[in-house]
Image (spheres, rainbow, N blue to C red):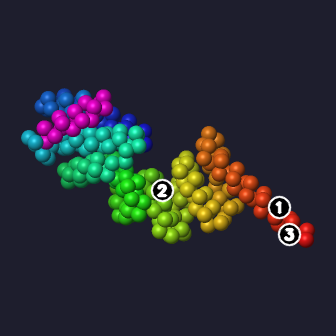
């Protein structure tokens, strides 16, 4: 989700300009500058101090939500899926939504996805469909949330629903690589080797550098060849 980090930087620059033009206090200006360089702890400290004075300040609350998001996402990049950090982030977005519901809907949606994923990492049986549905209510094109929802449904045995979501993702966004992998896996687990090969082949053609798709396309191809050989031997008896 590199575009999310880019969005944080862009908004931080905008906030810095807004604070400067409006003559806001130095705490908000410091928070914005810290956001621009990825110093999320210092940004959170500055925005928190500003919010102690004016809890409903729109820009300071926005800055606080961005800082929390940035810190939590930084942890994601080193493999730390923190339920606590994403819960804190979402509490800030929830407050922000009460002040201005039009702000940061996509990032709020992304934070919900990250929380759901962190919960699943912590407990594979975690009930996260409600979280993912909230994410999709905010941004119906959040393909990460759609993809995870399909995986959760698949684990619950709802294979038809999962298949419908995966195919829907690929029809809307053929550049979303995980859906090729996951739809192929679903077909494979159901014993539909030819369908799995079809999907993995499409993905491998779309992403020739994706080793996972290339490998499983070859596995399915070898399996189909073996099936044909067995059929040939059976007919020859």
**For this rendering, which residue is in front, 76 or 98?**
76
Q: Measuring from the top left, give residue 208's x and y in whole percent.
A: 64, 41
Task: Report crowding for label 2: few under 14, some 14 to 19, many 20 or more residues within 10 A (C-alpha).
Answer: many
Q: Residue at x 50, y 65 (%)?
A: 154
Q: From what the image shows, is residue 58 above or below residue 13?
A: below
- Nearest to viewer (mark 2 / mark 1): 1
Q: Residue lying farthest right?
A: 236
Report the quarter where the N terminus lies.
top left
Q: From what the image shows, is residue 165 above or below residue 64?
A: below
Q: Secondary structure at mark 2?
A: helix
Is 125 magenta? The answer is: no
Q: Residue at x 31, y 39 (%)?
A: 70
Residue 234 — which label?
A: 3
Quadrant position of residue 10? top left
From the image, tell me which residue sits under label 1: 229
Q: Measuring from the top left, give residue 73's x and y in whole percent.
A: 35, 42
Badge count: 3
**For this rendering, which residue is in front, 188 or 79?**
79
Dominant SS type (magenta)? helix
Question: Horizontal placement of 160 versus 104: left or right?
Answer: right
Instruction: Report the span colored magenta.
Output: 34-51
From the image, tell me which residue sits under label 2: 147
Q: Is residue 237 visible?
A: yes
Is 47 magenta? The answer is: yes
């Amino acid at each position: 989700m590199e575009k999310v980090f880019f969005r944080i930087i862009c908004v931080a620059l905008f906030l810095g300009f807004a604070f400067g033009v409006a003559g806001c206090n130095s705490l908000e200006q410091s928070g914005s500058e810290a956001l621009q360089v990825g110093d999320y702890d210092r940004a959170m400290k500055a925005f928190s101090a500003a919010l102690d004075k004016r809890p409903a300040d729109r820009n300071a609350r926005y800055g606080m939500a961005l800082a929390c998001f940035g810190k939590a996402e930084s942890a994601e990049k080193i493999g730390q899926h923190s339920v606590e950090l994403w819960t804190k982030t979402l509490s800030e977005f929830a407050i922000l939504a009460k002040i201005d519901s039009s702000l940061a809907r996509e990032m709020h949606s992304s934070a919900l996805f990250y929380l759901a994923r962190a919960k699943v990492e912590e407990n594979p049986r975690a009930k996260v469909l409600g979280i993912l549905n909230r994410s999709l209510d905010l941004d119906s094109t959040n393909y990460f949330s759609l993809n995870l929802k399909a995986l959760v449904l698949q684990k619950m045995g709802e294979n038809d629903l999962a298949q419908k979501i995966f195919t829907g993702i690929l029809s809307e966004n053929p550049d979303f690589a995980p859906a090729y992998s996951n739809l192929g896996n679903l077909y494979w687990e159901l014993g539909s080797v030819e369908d799995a090969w079809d999907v993995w082949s499409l993905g491998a053609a779309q992403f020739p550098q994706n080793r996972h798709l290339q490998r499983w396309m070859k596995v399915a191809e070898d399996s189909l060849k073996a099936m044909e050989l067995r059929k040939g031997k059976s007919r020859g008896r």
